[in-house]
Image (tube, helix red, strand yellow):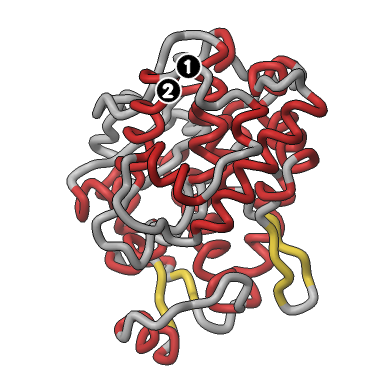
Amino acid sequence: MEEVRETSAWVARNSSHVTIDSSGLEKVVETMKESIPKVEWDYEGIHYFDNGPLTVQYLFVLDALNFCFWPDKDLNYDHLAKGLKEALLNDHSAFDADRLQKYTGPQLRELLKWPRSLPLEEERVRLLHEVGFELERSFEGKASKLVESCGKSAVKLVALVTRHFPGFRDHSMYKGHQVFLYKRAQIFAADLWGAFNGQGYGEFNDIGSITMFADYIVPAVLQQLGVLKYSSTLANAIQASSEIGAGTEEEVELRACSIFAVEKMRELLSIKCGKQMNHFNSLYAKKLILSQSIFFWF
């Protein structure tokens, strides 16, 4: 994950639209250091879990589809997680590799019990086909075999996922430099670790190596807290709900600067608390704004 940290740091140093306010970052760390909550992975009961290979299959499908719920205001991650859970409870073969390769858009909607087209539905179906095909070709159709081949290394798992499944290759070109973000591949490792409580399929000797997962919620939280500052052009675009295209300078800066800022927060917290904070996949900021937060301490 060093390439994620290094390239995000390079973006932060050369950013044109997003800057990190050191004083704002310090203030947030001071607020956080007194009370950092620990939240269980499935605290809302929205995920499928049977403590076995089927859970790994479920999580891999979930993380393949976990992106872009905009602009459908009624659709969110909970709907996706719960819908896939119910589908699997009703039919344990729903995510078999051969079936994943055959789903259509309407069938995916039916699987999720969703009444209308999904955002980027064709892309989601394509990813299901890709996951099913490569699992069948290289891992006996099972995501659990993929996990078993990583040797209890989250870093190796992320590398395997991004090598075999192009849909997980979350990287961009920015001012002539390649930037690595790897949001969903890292989420898969963290989901396994959280779901299995660091045991079995979730046992990774280097779970602390993964970074914050660069989505489009965390930058908004950091900006509200005064950690990130936007240029007037970017601020106006966001205020107008204008689409910020994938791979644009603005989009890469929002995500990469979030990673860099959270890494700096982690470093400061470790110093101030006298305890190593190896990884967290969300922010205390979410508790302030969304009344929830997710931290991992070890």
How packed is label 2: few (under 14 Cα within 10 Å), some, or many (20 or more)?
some
* Cα gap from disc 1 to disc 2, whole angstroms: 5 Å
Which quarter of the picture shows residue 195? top left
Q: Give amino acid for label 2.
A: Leu
Q: Using the image as rendered, state which of residue 140 and residue 12 is in the foreground.
A: 140
Q: Quadrant of the N terminus?
A: top right
Q: Using the image as rendered, state which of residue 140 and residue 269 is in the foreground.
A: 140
Tell me: 69 left or right of 146.
Answer: left
Q: Using the image as rendered, state which of residue 152 and residue 129 is in the foreground.
A: 129
Q: Give amino acid for label 1.
A: His
Q: Using the image as rendered, state which of residue 42 and residue 259 is in the foreground.
A: 42
How packed is label 1: few (under 14 Cα within 10 Å), some, or many (20 or more)?
few
Residue at horizontal 47 percent and vertical 69 percent from the top: 20
What mark, if any, has residue 92 been given in the picture? Answer: 1
The mark total stands at: 2
Tell me: 99 left or right of 214.
Answer: right
Dot 2 lies on which element? Answer: helix
Residue at horizontal 33 percent and vertical 57 percent from the top: 116
Tell me: 158 left or right of 297.
Answer: right
Dot 1 lies on which element? Answer: loop
The percent position of residue 149, horizontal first and vertical second, equals: 77, 18
Tell me: 185 left or right of 51.
Answer: right
Residue at horizontal 75 percent and vertical 37 percent from the top: 159
The percent position of residue 120, horizontal first and vertical second, equals: 50, 61
What mark, if any, has residue 88 been given in the picture? Answer: 2
Callout 1–callout 2 Cβ contact below 8 Å = yes
Which quarter of the picture shows residue 140? top right
What mark, if any, has residue 163 been given in the picture? Answer: none
Does 70 sit above or below residue 277? below
Residue at horizontal 49 percent and vertical 77 percent from the top: 244
The percent position of residue 107, horizontal first and vertical second, equals: 46, 43
